[in-house]
Image (cartoon, grey):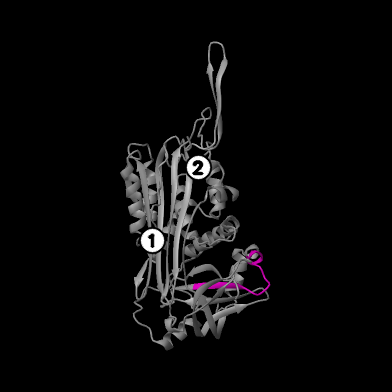
Amino acid sequence: MKKLLLLFMAIVLAGCGETGSVKERDLEEDVQNLPGDNGNAKKPADRSGAVQKLAAAVNGFAFDLYPLLHESAEGKNLFFSPASIHLALAMTYNGAAGGTKEEMAAVLHADGMETGELNGSYASFLNMAEVKKGKNELKLANSLWLKKGYPFLEPYKKTVRENYGASLHEADFADPQTGEAINRWAEENTKGKIKNMVNRIPPGTVAYLLNAVYFNGKWAFPFNKEQNFEDDFYAGGKNPVTVEYMTNEREYPYFENGQFQAVELPYAGKEFSLAVILPKEGESLEEIVGQLTPEEWERWSQSFAPRRGTVTLPKFQMEYETSLNEPLQRLGMESAFSGLADFSNMVENGGVSIDEVRHKSYVRVDEKGTEAAAATSVAIVESAATDSFHFKADRPFLFLIRENRSGMILFIGELTEPGAK
């Protein structure tokens, strides 16, 4: 059995008319109108040039970040929302200045856009993107949690509120209930799929910027559960595991080359689709990941064409969690995490930096469709002064007890197991 990669959930936003129930012959027409139909796909009327430019920035960011997360996953499951991460960082970016802003712009692929253009594009996208009709639902939410009494600039708060629809909350970060409130917000805005977004609020925290995204889509062509079967799944040379497969035979947008097969599964109403890329026997997933760029993805996606065949997928569910500090710094966003950070457009006189960018996600794929959720948090803390330090004895250490007048060492020890007696 071949390896399977859930590579990309391609969000295709269409018009705002009611979908209702769709007859099968209409769904067959939907396949003909999906992106990649030899250039003959219908273009959604509300995808403005600004939103398309924003989508290109998010996709560029996605294909930069994905290889780094793939590398750190070391063969384990991986699932993330580049849109959620980009949104949270875009809100943070509005508070940056100087070199920090330049670095963030490059990482976010926003260096070709004025800040106002980026914000306006997101305002348009958020206004058009939310869907709760027919069989599909897409919800995006943003929030800004600020330390009560801290000198955040009013223009910054206004920009985030008006362009990103962020709810603003003044909070006492020393109060454990603040962390509970943040976790409730993330859980409520992901239909209970993302829990415990914030485990512990570090000392010196002055802000949290959060995004949450929730998606629930029903297949245009549901799988028949009665046709499910169990078979082996082979992963990276490991022993096979038995999984439950679902199968469907009909016409789908399809594309293949010498390295992989690719199929696109539409959700009801044409607004969304799931693309799956499967390496051919003898081909490695790593080689495909190495080729993946926005330009290559665009070329592949334009090569899809309707073709009848059988699609067999495993049912699966997974959760994923990671800190994005290291990959974002590797992409070039370095000063934002250091004492050199310049967020003077967020806080009067600056003096703050990013402590952590954390991402959590969930996905379930079954006979009916796909449910997915993700949340991203950006924690902002007061920057350490240049002559200060952080000392955290969280690893084995040596200690000495001495008599100070003589300098005589009375005891020497090592702590390697704090719980032992």
Q: Residues within 10 Å of mark 1 (few under 14, many from 20)?
A: many
Q: Is residue 286 magenta?
A: yes
Q: Position of residue 303 (x, y in %)?
A: 60, 77
Which residue corresponds to mark 1? 193
SS class, disc 2: loop
Sequence-first disc among 1 and 2: 2
Q: Quadrant of the N terminus?
A: bottom right
Residue in the foreground of this view, choosing between 103 and 320? 320
Which amino acid, by three-letter code, is at mark 1? Answer: Lys
Question: Is 414 on the left-hand or right-hand side of 259?
Answer: left
Which residue corresponds to mark 2? 97
Q: Residues within 10 Å of mark 2 (few under 14, many from 20)?
A: some
Give the vertical position of 55 relative to 406 (above or below): below
Q: Can the viewer see residue 33 in this picture?
A: no
Residue that lies at the very extreme toward the front in this rendered image: 421
Q: Position of residue 82 (x, y in %)?
A: 50, 59
Identify the magenta region.
274-288
Q: Position of residue 236 (x, y in %)?
A: 62, 66
Q: Is residue 4 magenta?
A: no
Which amino acid, by three-letter code, is at mark 2? Answer: Ala
Q: Can the viewer see residue 395 in this picture?
A: yes
Quarter of the image for residue 306 reads bottom right
Q: Position of residue 295 (x, y in %)?
A: 61, 66
- CA gap between label 1 and label 2 equals 35 Å
Name the residue at 66% across, 75% down. Answer: 281
Name the residue at 39% across, 69% down. Answer: 216
Give the vertical position of 121 relative to 330 (above or below): below
Quarter of the image for residue 189 reads bottom left
1 vs 2, front mark: 1
